[in-house]
Image (spheres, helix red, strand yellow):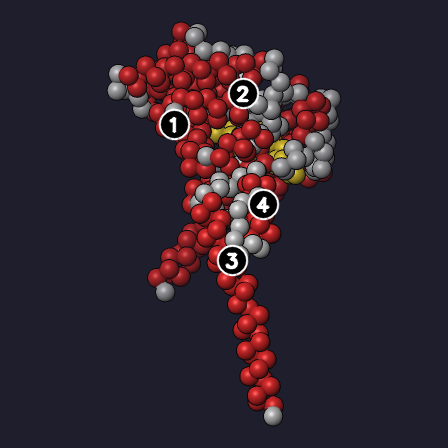
Amino acid sequence: MNKHIRGMTACLLFGLLGLVNPSIAVQSDSDPYLSARVFLEFNSALKKFGTQPFNMKFFPTAPLKIKAAMAVDLMKSRTWVGKPAVDVQKSLGKNTGHFWSATVPAYIIQEGWNEKKDTWQLVFLIDKRGIVSDIRIHRNCCL
Amino acid sequence: MFLPLVKIELVLILFSLLPSLSYGISCEDWFKNSKLQKGPTCADKCGVLDTHMDTFPCPGLCEKLCADSPKPKEMLSLGRYLYYPGLTPEEKSLVEQFPSEALKVFLAKERAEWGCQRIFHRDGVDDESDAFRHFVWAGLLEQDLSSELAKKFLDAHESNLPSNHPSKSMDLANNRAGLLRAKELKKNGMLSQSSLEAAAMTELKNGSLIVLIPRGMPK
């Protein structure tokens, strides 16, 4: 009984947190490692960064604001899902962010360390064959 | 007329089940007594183990006996610290061989990342935060594991990149610096996460760690 009450309270609290602060709306994961990380849901990412069509040639050298807006477009279009992660790095260049290891393509789209903001990065999650399985925006670090 | 037939059928079913039950139990004991280690070569070795009258069908169950083991608790907890698809084949092999040590390795990785985020407010690549993270991770492994195994895990994490890759060279050099400093600190009884973090900052300021893309130290 107590367990149920605690569970319901936790659900209610988390639900309320989500309502009060939509920027922390995160994607849920069955993978325990991923579930412990903060990823922006598409709508939160759209609200936060806006969107603009992804341009592969322009992305590597684009200013971070533009990169972030392109990242949102990538999240939606899912370009590269089903393709090898090494192809992403060939096209977009070396990682500028860090997620687990150099094998996971990650690119910073918002630097926060000098402005007391969160740092966000575009991450191409891979499957066990090194194929891109999802494209997400991950909180690299913290306020 | 009907009831005796049912009874006979029940007896027959019970008799038909008995051999499989006894094989199941005795084959498990047979396998356990052989002290074979579960792993890639287990099924081959198991297939040629000596058998007796009661264990002669057991080699036929080798594949199952070698694979069907309950995962240790460590393996279950590992998931929280491991991004399985991101593991290199060398890391996967080490995780399989040393599950409890692997838990320490990836817990240390998390601790190093938390430290890096706390101090640098970023988790970068090829920059000062990257050097710091590798130094501290390696040092924590020197604390938790034997030097040899620590180095094996650290090298395995970099094994996907070609040997002449600058990022790989940077990471390996900073790992080595972390291992060496941790040994010194251990000798003096001063090895801890905070002493490693302080050492990493000193070495970064002295320019002793490798940084490919300087982005600046925390303010």
Disc 4 chain ID:
B
What residue sits right under mark 3 in the picture? B54
What residue sits right under mark 2 in the picture? B125
Is label 3 in a helix, a strand or a loop?
A: loop
The disc, 2 or 1, on the residue closer to the chain's N-terminal end is 2
Mark 3 or 2: in front is: 3
Label 3 to label 4: alpha-carbon separation: 16 Å
Q: For the residue marked with disc 3, what is the amino acid? A: Asp
- The spot of residue A96 in percent (x, y) is 58, 22
Mark 4 or 1: in front is: 4
- The spot of residue A56 in percent (x, y) is 73, 25
Residues tagged by mark 2 and mark 1 found on one chain of the structure? yes
Res. B169 image quadrant? top right
Residue A92 is left or right of residue A37, and the answer is right
The disc, 3 or 1, on the residue closer to the chain's N-terminal end is 3
Residues tagged by mark 3 and mark 1 found on one chain of the structure? yes
Q: Residues within 10 Å of mark 1 (few under 14, many from 20)?
A: some
Q: For the residue marked with disc 2, what is the amino acid? A: Val
What residue sits right under mark 4 in the picture? B47
Residues tagged by mark 4 and mark 2 found on one chain of the structure? yes
**In this view of the protein, which residue sits in the foreground, B164 or A51?**
B164
Mark 3 or 4: in front is: 3
Residue A38 is left or right of residue B139, and the answer is right
- Residue at x 68% of width, y 26% of height: A86
Is label 1 in a helix, a strand or a loop?
A: loop
**In this view of the protein, which residue sits in the foreground, A47 or B206?**
B206
In the rendered view, tell whether residue A83 sits above or below residue B16: above
